[in-house]
């Protein structure tokens, strides 16, 4: 079969990223312009600032990408773009760039769901093995998905409130740590002790998650200690929080593997970089003889390479959009 080279565009949050990916697995070049430093002083992503920054950087990133790849638009076969979910103003910038390029060149426009992108990040290193369970854990999502074959998604559970990365970032903020706080909480948790009495987040029979309760428990403890003029032991709080979160996520995921009789687990999204989660899954999967796949850290956080990988499999399934394609802030339907 002829090679399919994809120009992929991802602007769903605070990263302007473009990639050129061959056949859904071979990364030719990627450029990521991250806005983290711009948003740091606000303690989180400011949507309006994010979309303005995407406008400023989008054509620069595109030029840099072709220069890096030593290619031109003539070498591209398909254009993959994240249409959602994400920040609407941010999504629209990437989508407009993709639609304009598709219109000018007549090349197929492939709409990619952001979660599908996170899942296919794994395909950049090893070909996905089916059937599989995918756990997508990021700043915007906590989802458990069953896939019987390529580009077939059955959502079996997800968060009812905050995404796990969001909870990490909020807990970090309460503890006076920088944004994004997830990696900092993770690093500090190694140094602390599990001494705080935090609740297990939605430790029930469902495959859903809820992190607002444990986040509120941290807020209450921090406020109470402040009122009593007592110091909060930040490292111990990080350990206690991380232990509860890792315990519930790993427990539900391992149960899903058993119930669905699946031997392949992939983990994706920014929180897949979490050491507690990686270590616990590594141990459990070894015990249960599950093939575990976690992408390199650079493919865990938002990037266009993963969108290029997913776009190839969407294209093979005949998923092509027209220029009416719109951005969607929330979309769990996987209709594309
Ligand atoms: O996938 P991602 O780059 O963006 C979204 O689609 O949301 O994920 C970013 C999230 C942030 O909330 C960040 O704090 C979290 O991933 N994160 C971590 C770690 N590294 C990144 N959370 C916990 N432990 C980590 N090591
Ligand atoms: Zn993401």
Image: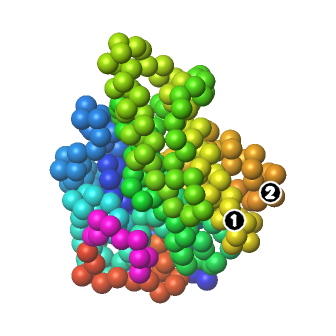
Q: Main secondary structure of the magenta part?
A: loop
Tell me the residue that label 1 is attached to: 257
Residue 189 x, y percent position in the rendering: 56, 29
Measured as percent of width and height from the top left, residue 238 is found at 51, 30
Quadrant occupied by the N terminus? bottom right
User: Left of 317 or right of it: where is 194?
Assistant: right
Q: Are marks 1 and 2 in contact (CB under 8 Å)?
A: yes
Q: Residue at x 58, y 25 (%)?
A: 195
**Can you say whether 34 is above or below 265 in the image?**
above
Q: Which sits in the foreground, 192 or 324? A: 192
Magenta residue span: 327-335
Q: Quadrant of residue 110?
A: bottom left
For disc 2, the marked residue is 288
| Res 212 seen here | yes
Q: How many marks?
A: 2
Residue appearing at x 53%, y 75% in the figure: 153
Front residue of 223/29: it is 223
Point 57% across, 41% down: residue: 244
- Which secondary structure lies at badge 1? helix
Q: Is 329 colored magenta in this rendering?
A: yes
94 falls in the magenta region:
no
Image-quadrant location for residue 10: bottom left
**Above-or-below relation of 267 to 260:** above
> Tag 2, which secondary structure?
helix
Q: In the rendered image, which quarter contains the C terminus?
A: bottom left
Counting residues from the start of the chain, the first of labels 1 and 2 encountered is 1
Q: Could you say which disc has been placed on residue 196 in the image?
A: none
Q: Separation of disc 1 and disc 2 at Cα?
A: 10 Å
Residue 78 seen anywhere in this rendered image of the structure: no
């Amino acid at each position: 079969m002829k090679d399919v080279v994809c120009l992929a565009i991802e602007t769903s949050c605070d990263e302007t990223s473009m990639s050129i990916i061959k056949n859904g697995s071979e990364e030719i070049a990627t450029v990521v312009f991250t806005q983290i430093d711009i948003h740091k002083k606000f303690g989180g992503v400011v949507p309006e600032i994010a979309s303005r920054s995407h406008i400023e950087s989008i054509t620069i990133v595109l030029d840099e990408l072709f220069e890096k790849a030593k290619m031109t638009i003539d070498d591209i076969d398909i254009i993959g773009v994240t249409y959602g979910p994400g920040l609407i103003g941010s999504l629209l910038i990437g989508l407009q760039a993709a639609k304009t390029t598709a219109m000018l060149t007549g090349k197929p426009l492939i709409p990619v769901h952001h979660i599908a992108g996170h899942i296919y990040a794994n395909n950049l290193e090893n070909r996905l093995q089916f059937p599989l369970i995918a756990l997508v854990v990021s700043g915007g999502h906590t989802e458990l998905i069953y896939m019987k074959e390529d580009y077939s998604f059955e959502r079996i559970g997800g968060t009812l409130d905050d995404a796990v990365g969001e909870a990490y970032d909020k807990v970090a903020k309460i503890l006076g740590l920088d944004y994004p706080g997830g990696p900092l909480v993770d690093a500090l948790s190694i140094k602390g002790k599990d001494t705080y009495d935090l609740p297990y987040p939605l430790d029930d029979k469902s495959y859903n998650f809820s992190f607002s309760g444990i986040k509120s428990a941290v807020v209450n403890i921090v406020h109470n200690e402040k009122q009593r003029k007592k110091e909060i032991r930040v490292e111990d709080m990080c350990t206690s929080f991380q232990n509860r979160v890792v315990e519930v996520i790993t427990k539900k995921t391992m149960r899903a593997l058993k119930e669905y009789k699946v031997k392949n687990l992939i983990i994706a999204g920014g929180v897949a970089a979490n050491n507690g989660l990686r270590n616990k899954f590594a141990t459990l999967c070894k015990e249960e003889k599950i093939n575990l796949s976690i992408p390199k850290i650079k493919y865990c956080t938002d990037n266009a390479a993963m969108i290029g990988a997913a776009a190839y499999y969407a294209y093979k399934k005949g998923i092509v959009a027209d220029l009416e394609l719109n951005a969607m802030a929330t979309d769990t339907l996987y209709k594309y």
